[in-house]
Amino acid sequence: MHELVKKLLAGDRRSAARLISIMENNAPEKEELLAQIYPFTGRAHVVGLTGSPGAGKSSLADALTREIRAEGQKVGIIAVDPTSPFTGGALLGDRIRMQEHATDPGVFIRSMGTRGSLGGLAQATRDAIRVLDAFGCQVILVETVGVGQSELDIMYHADTTLVVLTPHAGDHVQVIKAGIMEIADIFVINKADLGGVVQMATSIESMLDLSPRLNGWRPPVLSTVAHEHRGIRELWEAIKRHRACRRDNGAAREREKAHRELLDLVRRQLEELVARHLNARCGLVEQVATRQKDPYTAAREIMAGLLAVGEKAQLAKFARGKEE
Amino acid sequence: MHELVKKLLAGDRRSAARLISIMENNAPEKEELLAQIYPFTGRAHVVGLTGSPGAGKSSLADALTREIRAEGQKVGIIAVDPTSPFTGGALLGDRIRMQEHATDPGVFIRSMGTRGSLGGLAQATRDAIRVLDAFGCQVILVETVGVGQSELDIMYHADTTLVVLTPHAGDHVQVIKAGIMEIADIFVINKADLGGVVQMATSIESMLDLSPRLNGWRPPVLSTVAHEHRGIRELWEAIKRHRACRRDNGAAREREKAHRELLDLVRRQLEELVARHLNARCGLVEQVATRQKDPYTAAREIMAGLLAVGEKAQLAKFARGKEE
């Protein structure tokens, strides 16, 4: 076993930090290290926090951390910003308010930016979660700032997803649009001191009335004032209830996640292959552009180039096998 | 040449309608027919209309059609609704107001829904555009209702993209978010009689000040009142100006489109292949889910199953070639 992994499993913070950097930078040794870490994962409860900018996700993560620490559990916090190419230091500077937890050895905080690739960010986040899981964090909070597909990809790896809203009319519509409605396990109306909470909660509840219930869980709608630590205990209790409910269908869920991740990994490798192959065959692109060849015929030719050789070889193998 | 294609090229409406249905339903004969149609495409000017629901895209398309018909050009209209699984009849019923054009032989109207696959919709729309192109439509208006990636995919096939807005504060923010800003060739503030146009235009112009200009084209910001036919002539003139500007870099643009389409087609075929392959290897998924094997190792094994055979065969071929 690699020295870094050994130290990670022994609870060494610096090793955890270095391993997350390796995951984030997609370093050559990444896959080997992950293979060693992977058997020690699957124990942490991953809580995702998503919602529109300004909804107070970070304050909520802070308040939740305080609540969880009071129970003595080790907490990891990953702040993901798909809109930022910056990482680590830059965002951490922004988290001055986190100083309360920064000196607490039971809390590990990390920020992650895109480094140019959205797909890569979801994958890096997934692997950072694994590092913190093996590190011994019992709860891992993942907050993300972005909108759209990358956010959904990241949230898919959470065991419990909180959709954080403010009591403000516009937000309500946005939630439905972005397809976030479907991924919510718990709705949190933060900044509840602003008023308008009841209307907001009512409209969410009426949406929920129309949604099918998954595994008997109906997402509760809670209200909080994070900076005053109001409603945080109730939120943490709801998260634990959801966890217990999830555990009952744990195996199916793990299989689904594994299936999705494999599909994703293989797809991305194939895409790279196709892009390279297409660059090597720019004559074909030219023929399509000038209407000498239609796109479907050209696509078939590319597929043939990629795969037919393989098929032929397999047929040949099969034929040989018969002869022998 | 297939009878349907012959009739299409001769301007037969019913053949056009049937061919679009074939493209939409992904019928077995689709690729063969498209190969025959493809050489007769690339002549129409494709104008995309996008923007938030309620911005009046359909009314604008109607008004533009009137303007273009006055010049005697043949017009195709494709209304795409990624949020609707329904197609043809259902949406056409909604287009009663289009009656003005319904009896005009110089106008062809068609609605398209998802039929369950978003990726398929972008491709079906692309091929429907080709049918209308070969049918002799000189201008094809493509309006889409959806938000997000599918809309962007569809708009990518337009030569000129109109982003339609209403003078309402909220819209402005939405545009930036959805990444639509970057694809706009012309901004249209419709329902300009509602007031607030100047503020809206000013904020768009200031965003444009910060954006890089593509091929020397700065998107103009126009205002219209579609149902009163106000500002429509100016809009049509702007579209023609953009067309002339585009024509100068026509070849590069066609190559880019062909490259993108090929990548897209091959990618989708490979994805199907991978999904099938993965279903056949559900034991691997189980191993990952239960932490017996890490996802990267499993993904490598799948890739090997798909491709390594092909590589080996190629190496063997290479070795044989040397020996001979």
Image: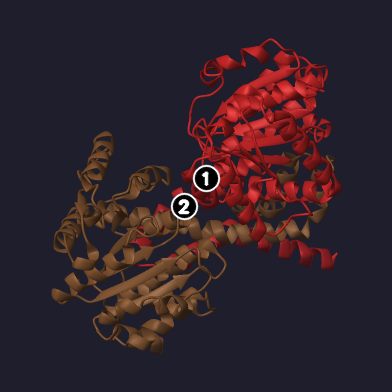
Chain colours: A red, B brown
Query: Callout 1: helix, strand or loop?
Result: loop
Q: Position of residue A305 (x, y in %)?
A: 55, 58
Q: Is residue A280 visible?
A: yes
Q: Could you tell me which quadrant the C terminus of chain B lies in?
A: bottom right
**Circles 1 and 2 on the same subunit:** no
Q: Is residue B324 visible?
A: no
Chain to which the residue tagged by mark 1 belongs: A
**In the figure, residue B56 lies in which quadrant?**
bottom left
Q: CA distance from mark 1 to mark 2?
A: 8 Å
The residue located at (52%, 35%) in the rendering is A82
**In the figure, residue A35 lies in which quadrant?**
top right
The residue located at (23%, 69%) in the rendering is B63
Relative to A138, B40 lies left or right: left
Q: Could you tell me which quadrant the N terminus of chain B lies in?
A: bottom left
Determine whether label 1 and label 2 are within 8 Å by CB: yes
In the image, B242 versus A279, the foreground residue is B242
Disc 1 crowd, CA 10 A, few/some/many (<14, 14-19, 20+): some
In the image, A121 versus B130, the foreground residue is A121
Dot 2 amino acid type:
Gly
Mark on residue B148? 2
Q: Position of residue A260 (x, y in %)?
A: 69, 49
Q: Position of residue B182 (x, y in %)?
A: 34, 45
Seen in the picture, residue B106 relative to A88 is either above or below; the reply is: below
Mark 1 lies on residue: A148
Chain to which the residue tagged by mark 2 belongs: B
